[in-house]
Amino acid sequence: VSKVLQLALGILAAIGGFVDIGDLVFNIEAGATFGYQLLWVVVVGVVGIIVYSEMCGRVATVAKRPVFDAVRERMGFGVGLGVLVASQVVNLMTLAAEVGGAALVLQLLAGISYRALIVVAVVGLGVAIWVLPFEWIERLFGYMGLCLLVFAVGAIKLHPDWGAVGHGFVPHADTGNFMLYAYFAVGLLGAAMTPYEVYFYSSGAVEEGWTQKDLGLNRTNSMVGYVLGGTLSFALMITAGALYLPRGIDPQFIGTVALGADVPLGTIGLILAMVGILFAVGGAAIDTCLSGAYNVSQYFGWEWGKHRRPSEAPRFALSWMALLVLGLLIIVTGVDPVMLTEYSVIVSVVALPLTYLPILLVANDKAYMGRYANGRLANAFGLFYLAIIMVVALTAIPLMILTNGGKG
Amino acid sequence: MTELQVDLALGLLDHQLVDCNGRRCGNVDDLELDLGRDQPRVEAILVGPPVWRNRGLLGRLLASLSSARTVRVPWTEVEKVDSAVHLRKPASEYRLGRGDDRARRWVEWIPGS
């Protein structure tokens, strides 16, 4: 029974931890602009993150190589260092955006100044990382993030045209503005497959001390969690498609997102939505912050991990603190978190192939992986997604420029 | 470790160093080879910013910013090589992990460290 319970608890945490500010912004904006047409892209993105998370978890467990060990080993010191710098920039932008999102929600709840609440959010996150063990961080933020399920209930109560929703899962483009459609498709893929998710997942496998025995359980855990987490993305897009598109609302504020639960469900819905968003973006802020510290420590061979005391891994601890402070400095300038989110997702798409290629290479190395090396299926999916990612990476920035960052 | 055949580029270079207490204490940044025999032999592992100089533009830049010295670990100190390179003694005996030793005072004043 305890195994079943453990599995259920893990899955719940994975669902609640799935959505971050990138998913919130892109799903809502895509829904408000194109209705349900882009639902199929979310499916593609969710399968992609499952394919590479599974591979990263397996490589970290069997070959004992978290992502940035593999990056340095396979791409060499020089290129690896370039990848490190690029991914740290992306991580930092994402972190700043998540912190800004958390502060905006706090502002809606508490009504005091946004800048003061940024500081409150950063201090809160810093204390959480310092005090809580790794598993607790994952669970606390994951479970509280489950409040976002209110959007799934809300989406049903809005009585969307289910025929049109179903049609959204079939790839099609029913629009005169194909550029904008492509921009949102790229953004939705990027939001679902953000690089920090695989950094965090792979280092997390080492933090939790996975062995080959745990591999099956954890794989099931994350796959089911991601699939069910993906339904939250559907719910957000359907809500926006049913609520904002017909009324011509352009959801440029986090508050507009929360309203998506207020209209069908009233004040309780609104509060649950805000709590859900707060913990979803807060959890993602912690994930990005720790990911940045994992990456730099692994690259330079420093002691790392929450499973070590800060005094045993001081450079790791100082790294996440420094990132948190840098994130604070970026967002406190007053840069719009929604805009920053869009930029961070689009830039992260460009860094994706550099993260995924070394993982694919190590996962194929029989010398390390033995019978856990990639089989045909994992390689077919891995190569397919690497190809998609390459195309997306090449088109992301041109599309952002051509569509004026999604403003049409 | 005396006799072991490895692919130097993939099997050794850039691997994690772990001391006898399981402490991560740097990466294999470069290797010192003896090329005087039919097959090259690894004489020592080199660790530290100065050897990054040979490893690309960014490496040169980082090396010039750091004042740390190269640490040379003789191959005879290697206990075993798997996903990491395991050393026989604690890191401090090789003067490895000194960056973490120096950084410790910045965090150890915080309660719960």
Image (cartoon, coloured by chain):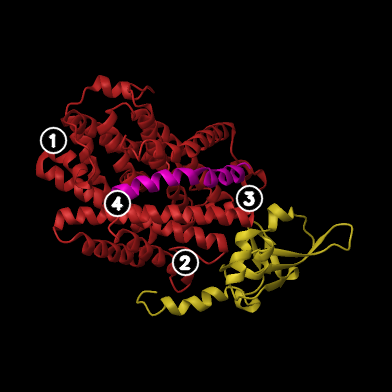
Chain colours: A red, B yellow
Q: Badge 1 is on which residue?
A: A264
Would residue A86 be found to the left or right of residue B52 on screen?
left
Q: Badge 3 is on which residue?
A: A74
Q: Which structural element holds mark 4?
A: helix
Residue A195 horizontal/vertical position (percent): 45, 47
Magenta part of the chain: A338-364
Q: Amino acid at mark 4?
A: Pro
Chain letter belonging to callout 4: A
**Residue A316: mark:** 2
Q: Is residue A295 above or below residue A28?
A: below
Residue at screen point 57% across, 43% down: A357
Q: Badge 4 is on which residue?
A: A337
Q: Amino acid at mark 1?
A: Pro
Q: Amino acid at mark 2?
A: Phe
Front of the two marks 2 and 4: 4
Q: Nearer the viewer, residue B75 or A285?
A: A285
**Mark closest to the chain's N terminus, 1 or 4:** 1
In the rendered image, the quadrant that contains the N terminus of chain B is bottom right
Q: Amino acid at mark 3?
A: Arg
